Image (cartoon, rainbow, N blue to C red):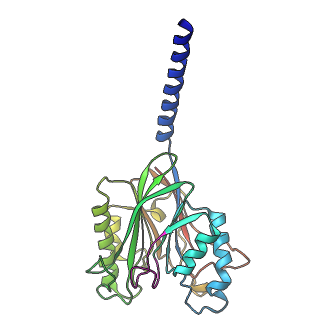
Amino acid sequence: MRRKLILFSLMGLALLSGVSAEARDDNKPVELKVMSYNIRNGEANDGTNSWQYRAVATMMMLEDQIPDIFGVQEAYCYQVEAIKTFTDYKAVGVGREDGKRKGECMSIFYNKKKLKMIKWGTFWLSETPKKPSLGWDAACKRTATWALMKDKKSGKKFFFVNTHLDHVGKEARKNGLALVSQKISEINKKNFPVVLTGDFNVTLEDPCLEVMDSWMKSARETAVKSDMSGSFNNWGKQNPETPIDYIYYKGFSSCLVFEVVKKSYDGRKFVSDHFPVSALLVF
């Protein structure tokens, strides 16, 4: 009888030890590598920089950088499918023209081994955000895709939002970013950490950024180790490059690194007319 009691006691201690260890793991800092990547739409006639010639370079870049989650801008469905086929990423997003497969997608890709997608959605940057629509003085329909994600190991949740502001309309950029801010507040009732990625088509001094600066942090501006160089290269014609691609965050304890990814892949100097930008966040 005494031997059984000792055995049960040891089993109980083992279980409690396991729970304590798990709790300690949950409290450990969790690193999250995020990226924003304007992939350059596959329909553009860019000569030897066209998608069919640099698709392999994109896959090699992702294999080298290994972001846990990233947002792409300008991607057509076949570009999204190519990344899903040749990498370990899953993706969500819709075409901006019809809310299905037509036109560019502001897709979110995530490493299915590390992260779980709980729910997601898309809205249009316009006065009628629930349906495909052109907003304010924009030249194109613009969207934002959001996803509620869960880190599988720690159980921590966060929202990831990806967008592309208009390249022409000043009001569309200002109102579009204000709408993104509003929508994040509406969907994030539990105040989870938030990441926002995107090609904003504005430089660092543009007043439209004030709405985000008022409640989120720019990874470029706050990283322990940062890279202030530009991201739009225009296939080498933009010299110096212009910083128009952004990563914002809220609810994370710090941003360790912000980087403009300028490495060459597959012998190609440019994986797109934008360099990807990445940030290493901690929560």
| Residue furthest to the front | 1
- Direction from residue 214 to residue 104 in the image, left or right: right
> From this viewpoint, which residue is outermost toward the right?
267
* x and y, in percent, of residue 136 in the image: 28, 86
Residue 42 at x, y = what percent? 56, 85
Main secondary structure type of the part rendered in magenta: loop
From which residue to which does the magenta span run?
92-105
Residue 49: within the magenta? no
Q: Residue at x 58, y 84 (%)?
A: 239
Q: Is residue 282 above or below residue 239?
A: above
Instruction: Tell which of 261 and 185 is nearer to you.
Output: 185
Q: Position of residue 21 (x, y in %)?
A: 52, 32
Decide if residue 210 is on the left or right side of residue 20.
left
Q: Which quadrant of the figure has residue 206? A: bottom left
**Which residue is nearer to you in this view: 13 or 2?**
2
- Picture residue at 46% right of the left edge, 85% below the top: 103
Query: Which quadrant of the view contains residue 64?
Result: bottom right
Using the rendered image of the protein, determine whether residue 274 is visible from the camera's viewpoint.
no
Magenta-drawn stretch contains 96: yes
Residue 50 visible, this angle: yes
- Residue at image coords 48%, 56%: 116
Q: Residue at x 51, y 48 (%)?
A: 30
Q: Measured from the top left, where is residue 168 in percent x and y? A: 39, 88
